[in-house]
Amino acid sequence: MMNRKKIEQILMVVGPILLFILVLLVVLSFNKDSENVFIDDKPPVDQNVDYFENISDMSEEEIRELVEQKRLVLQNFFKELKYYSISEVVDGYSASDDSNYIVIGESFLDTLKNILSFDTYSYYWNQLKEVAPKANVLINERIYMGNRDLFVDLFTNSAIATEGVNVESLSLVSANNEIIESIVDIKYCEENIYDVCQRFDRYSFILIFEENAWKVSEFTKQVN
C-alpha cells in the first residue's frame, strides 16, 4: 500500500499538469467561440429618424425658420384670397356662372408672384384670362377669370392644407444655397388616441433661390 508521503509527491507532479491542461482547454474553447462573434461598435440606427443634409451657409435653425415662414405666408395667402363674382363684374355672365368661375384682382396675383417661383406661378397664371369689368363697376385694377376649382384642391391636398387636418409637421431633407427640400406630414388623427389616424399624407415642400429671394417651387406633389 502506497504511503502518504509518496501520494503527496505524485500529486505535486500530476496536479500542475492537470491544471495546465484544464487552462489550455478553456483558452481553446474561448478562441473557437470568438471566431463566430462579430463586434459592431457603431451606434444603432433608428430607421424612423429623418436626417438633414445641410451644405448651405445657413444653420439648420435658420433654414427651418425660413421654410416654416414661407409655408405660413403661402397658407395665409390662400386663406385670405378674395374673389369677385363673375356675374357682378363681367358682362355676359349670370349668377349660374358664379359656381364655375372666379375673378381675381391683379393685386392678389402680384402677391402670389412674389411668393412662388417663376415656373410655379406660371402654372396658375396660364390658367387665367384677363377680362374687362362692367362699365358701371368701379374696379381700380386689372382682373382675371379662371375656373372656380383652380385653387380648391390646395386646401385639402397640398403641403399647406387646412381642411381635414389636425396634425401637421415639417421635416427638413436637404439644403444648399440654391434649393431647400423638405417634407410636410399632413394628418387627421382621433383625439386622445395615440397614432390612430384616418389620414396620413406627405407632401414635398421646396424653396429655390430666385431673383435674390427664396420662393416656393413645389408644394402640391405627394411623396411616399
Image (cartoon, grey):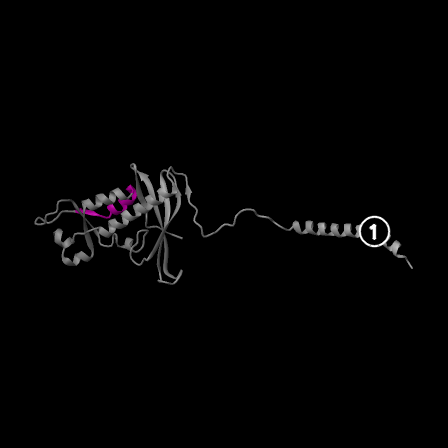
**Residue interval drawn in magenta:** 117-130
Q: Seen from this angle, which residue lies furthest front? A: 5
Compared across the picture, whether 145 is left or right of 10 comes to left
Compared across the picture, whether 131 is left or right of 154 comes to left
Instruction: From the viewer's side, name the closer residue of 218 and 147.
Output: 218
What residue lies at 83% left-to-right and 51% top-to-bottom? 12
Above or below: residue 187 compared with residue 123: below
Residue 6 placement (x, y as % from top left):
89, 54
The quarter holding residue 165 reads: bottom left
The count of marks equals: 1
Residue 39 placement (x, y as % from top left):
59, 48
Dot 1 amino acid type: Met
Residue 139 placement (x, y as % from top left):
12, 47
Above or below: residue 103 compared with residue 190: above
Compared across the picture, whether 131 is left or right of 213 comes to left
Label 1 sits on a secondary structure element that is helix
Above or below: residue 168 compared with residue 70: below
Residue 119 placement (x, y as % from top left):
29, 43
What residue lies at 74% left-to-right and 50% top-to-bottom? 23
Residue marked by disc 1: 12
What is the crowding at mark 1: few (fewer than 14 residues within 10 Å), some, or many (at least 20)? few
What residue lies at 25% left-to-right and 50% top-to-bottom? 76
Q: Seen from this angle, which residue lies furthest left? A: 136
Whether residue 118 is in magenta: the answer is yes
